[in-house]
Amino acid sequence: MLKLSGVTKIHVAGEVRTTALDRIDLEIGAGEYVAITGPSGCGKSTLLGVLGLLDVPTSGDYWFDGQNVAGWSEARLNALRRGAVGFIFQSFNLIEELCVFENVELALEYTGTPAAERRRRVGAMLERLGISHRSGHRPSQLSGGQQQRVAIARALVARPSMLLADEPTGNLDTAHGDEVMRLLRTINAEGTTVVMVTHSPAHAAQASRTLHLLDGRIVVDALRAA
């Protein structure tokens, strides 16, 4: 599904050049559940951004579903990403001016989905995640765990083939964090590829494969023991 070959990403700020990714070679198959770990500043979020077509490599090749997208324009990447990739972030990134239903529906408004179908799919997704009773509430009226469930609903409602999660439990207490992890396992078991950045060894251990980054390079690529 995904293949990176010699991918390097260099951030430039004035005269300062920082190598965030250093000649990364990586393949991720459809349906895998991959955890990305490593110390702060090692390139985890940069790698997630490249995988999710939010960022482009400085050099190297990236095949996404058989297409080498390195060098594609932002418009072409946006079109490919839409509906194919879902994102969950540590900060929930919900829009306070919109209610829960509208926040989730927003993910479908750029896909050309008819209004009646949008309403049906949003309602079904909120029901599935146990927050349909909060559909008319604003984000500030929800607990942290409820807000993250809304963010997950928004990420999933377009039925992406891949879900990327950047520290999805970082702002949650233990109970709500465990709930999010259960949801990710369920989503993966249903066939969605999941790639998650985490600092938690316990959460990383729930993935079927763990990548450990250090100084922009993959130093460990390990499958979970059966």
Image (cartoon, helix red, strand yellow):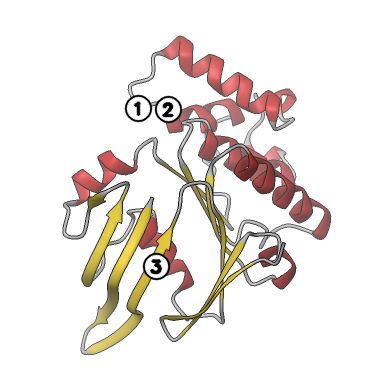
* Residue named by callout 3: 26
User: In terms of depth relative to the viewer, which is nearer, 209 or 86?
Assistant: 209
* Residue named by callout 2: 108
Residue type at numbered disc 2: Leu
Q: Which mark is residue 134?
A: none
Whole-percent x and y of residue 21?
Answer: 35, 77
Image quarter where the C terminus lies is: bottom right
Q: Give the CA distance from mark 2 to mark 3.
A: 31 Å
Q: Give the CA distance from mark 1 to mark 3.
A: 30 Å
Residue at 29% in and 77% down: 11
**In the image: residue 145, left or right of residue 113:** right
* Mark 2 or 3, nearer chain start: 3
Residue at 70% in and 63% down: 203
Helix, strand or loop at label 3? It is strand
Where residue 61 sits, quadrant-wise, is: bottom left
Vertically, is 56 above or below 10?
above
Where residue 26 sits, quadrant-wise, is: bottom left
* Mark 1 or 3, nearer chain start: 3
Residue type at numbered disc 3: Leu
Q: Give the CA distance from mark 2 to mark 1.
A: 5 Å
Residue at 52% in and 27% down: 102
Residue at 54% in and 52% down: 32
As drawn, which residue projects farthest toward the front?
226
* Residue named by callout 1: 111
Q: Residues within 10 Å of mark 2 (few under 14, many from 20)?
A: many
Whole-percent x and y of residue 155?
Answer: 52, 40
As drawn, which residue projects farthest toward the top?
116
As drawn, which residue projects farthest toward the bottom?
15
Contact (Cβ within 8 Å) of mark 2 with mark 1: yes
The reply to whether residue 144 is in sight is: no
**In the image: residue 209, left or right of residue 19:** right
